[in-house]
Image (cartoon, rainbow, N blue to C red):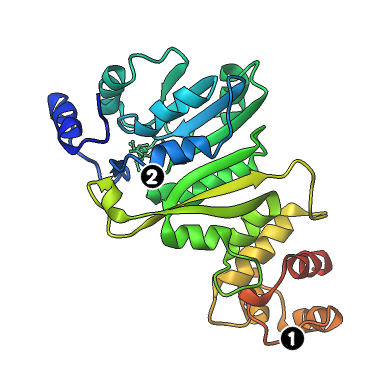
Amino acid sequence: MDLYDYNTVKRILSGHGFTFSKALGQNFLINPDVCPKMADSLSADEHTGVLEVGPGIGVLTKELCSVAGKVVSVELDKRLLPVLDETLAQFNNLEIVNDDVMKLDLHKLIAEKFDGCTSVKVCANLPYYITSPVIMTLLESRLPIDEIVVMVQKEAGERLCAQVGTRLAGAVTAAVNYYADSETLFDVARDSFMPSPKVDSVVIRLKVRKDEKYKVNNEKKFFTVVKSAFSQRRKTALNSISNTMGISKKDLTEIFDNLGLDLNIRAEKLLMDDFIHIAEKL
Ligand code: SAM
């Protein structure tokens, strides 16, 4: 069964009376080059567990089952379950979980499903409406995973993989950078999907650090400072933090002066250490 063939996919889906849901970010890959490249980039073996979010009709799932010891795919849309039964029937190292990835206890799922695996990785063509929330949940929960290889919209990918302190950086850039090393793997054109979205995509890799790179005493305060600094991008970081966190400009000016920071600096120019030091002084 060729899941990359437009007519085959159409036949399978109409056989199950399936119609695409835009709200669930259902754009299925039909470019045969993408999924094998994503699966290969994991360097997985028979001891590796892979967690997939949103298998769709199973194009990527199939490749993951071929390279890993165990694959668990979380799919919210229950209309896809009979489709996956048909398309992935030959794999006995696969489990489909019908649930919302944002509501699952992922610690429990990993402990239960990947017992005996020497490493666990996440690989997915993410539903675009929850790209950042999914990535941040995976990282903030400090799950026992060592890497995340995901396809995201090009613009989101540029932000996620930007260097902190550069024009493309946002709050999510600093947040990702806190937990992981990011890199862009390859671009994917919009006509690789059915139906075709309005924008191109990119596959990125986040290597989750085992050791802490940054020493932060109060993580909650650090993330509040980061979010506040970027919340009003047109304003200076000082004004943005002051307005959002309700801290007087006088106090913040003193802190910026003590840290040797330009009072007119914008959040995109601040480095990780700057955010950390500002949070420490507050
Ligand atoms: N992996 C398939 C592919 O590459 O062709 C499908 C990817 S499609 C962009 C996103 C998939 O995520 C869809 O199957 C959609 O139903 C599923 N999905 C959307 N929201 C979800 C959620 N909250 N939890 C789990 N799966 C979700």
Q: Mark 2 and ligand 1: say if the CB distance to the nearest ligand atom is below 8 Å.
A: yes
**Residue at left 64%, top 34%?**
145
Depth order, front residue of 213/274: 213
Q: Which residue is mark 1?
A: 262
**Residue at left 30%, top 55%?**
190
Indicate left or right for 89 with 261 as reference: left
Report crowding for label 1: few under 14, some 14 to 19, many 20 or more residues within 10 A (C-alpha): some
Instruction: Give x and y (percent) for residue 56.
Output: 32, 33
Mark 2 belongs to which amino acid?
Answer: Pro
**Residue at left 29%, top 44%?**
27
Report crowding for label 2: few under 14, some 14 to 19, many 20 or more residues within 10 A (C-alpha): many
Ligand 1 visible in quadrant: top left
Give the image quarter of residue 11.
top left
Report the number of discs. Answer: 2
* Of callouts 1 and 2, the N-terminal one: 2
Depth order, front residue of 152/221: 152
Mark 1 belongs to which amino acid?
Answer: Asp
Element type where label 2 sits in the image: loop
Tell me if residue 265 comes above or below residue 114 in the rendering: below
Give the image quarter of residue 138.
top right
Instruction: Give x and y (percent) for residue 93.
Output: 47, 15
Instruction: Give x and y (percent) for residue 83.
Output: 26, 23
Instruction: Give x and y (percent) for residue 280.
Output: 82, 64
Q: Which residue is mark 2?
A: 127
Q: How far is mark 1 from mark 2, CA to CA?
A: 40 Å
Indicate left or right for 55 with 250 as reference: left
Residue 102 shows in the view: no
User: Where the C terminus falls, by quadrant?
Assistant: bottom right
